[in-house]
Amino acid sequence: MDLLEKNEHFWQRLFDGLFRRGGEVALQPVEIAKKLAKVMVARRTISVNNVYVPNVYLVNLSPYDFERLSVFEHSLARELEDYISKKAAEQNYTLVGKPRVEFEVEDELTPGEMRVAARMEEEPETASGNVAGPAAEEGDTLIYRAIEEAPGPPEEPVLKLAVLEGPDAGRTFLLQKGRQVLGRQPACDFVLTDEQVSRRHCQVEESHDRVLVTDLGSRNGTMVNGRRVERAFLKPGDRLQVGRSVLELQVS
């Protein structure tokens, strides 16, 4: 950061502080959009033919701003995702997947403040190598092709995550092929009620009998066998801790 940027940052913080002394100042969605654009440029990666930028953005808000914006959270997220697509197109940037914007509450932030984490996340591919998408359609009718029954391969071991500790102790999540997300958000594949678990806490990917865990910028981090990790492979018997919840990888 050069001297000009430091001065600009100082004066902005000073004026923000003066205004906030009179009461809580609400964060405006347009400020979030501007911040996303800045993070996009700062996190760009230059390749031979393309300039890649993040497509997944986690916006951390103060409890005051999160509560105020949560009443139209999904509409705001869709609007910001559309904004990211347009800004990337304007600059000829390449997105490796569909834009996604998510919101998290962070108790340490004051009204008007935010923190943005960004990453690249490719769309999962189908067996044919194409990006997964909606089922093929013709008019309004979904088309399904019959599959002749044939002797199946020998049964493969079933991998599962068993919740040993935490509010959801006793529950079991069966792992499927591909990527699955664990968190508090109802849209997650594995939903926990632990309030210390982020809405989208970590990603679990099962492939070729190996399980890869990737932290998704969670507030409290992801632990494997007592060690904090960003990415780690699990083997049966390993324990994954998110918030107050402990899950064990089991095979049956």
Image (tube, rainbow, N blue to C red):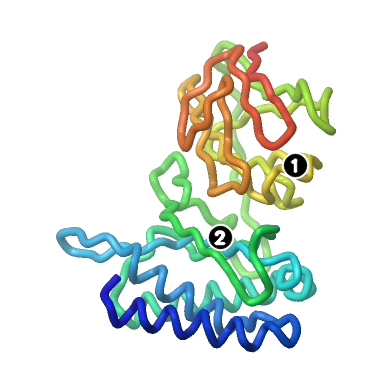
Name the side, left or right, on which 244 lies relative to 51. Answer: right
Q: Tell me the residue at 34%/83% (across/down).
A: 90
Q: Tell me the residue at 65%/59% (across/down).
A: 108
Q: Tell me the residue at 74%/47% (across/down).
A: 184
> Disc 1 marks which amino acid?
Val
Across and down, in percent, residue 143 comes to: 62, 54
Across and down, in percent, residue 241 comes to: 65, 29
The residue at which mark 1 appears reads as: 191
Label disc, if present, on residue 83 of the rendered structure: none
Assess disc 1: are there few (<14), some (14-19) or many (≥20) residues with their C-alpha within 10 Å of its C-alpha. Answer: some
Element carrying mark 2: strand
Name the side, left or right, on which 55 lies relative to 106. Answer: left
Picture quarter containing residue 175?
Answer: top right
Q: Quadrant of the C terminus?
A: top right
> Front-most of 229 and 207?
229
Label disc, if present, on residue 58 of the rendered structure: 2
> Disc 2 marks which amino acid?
Leu
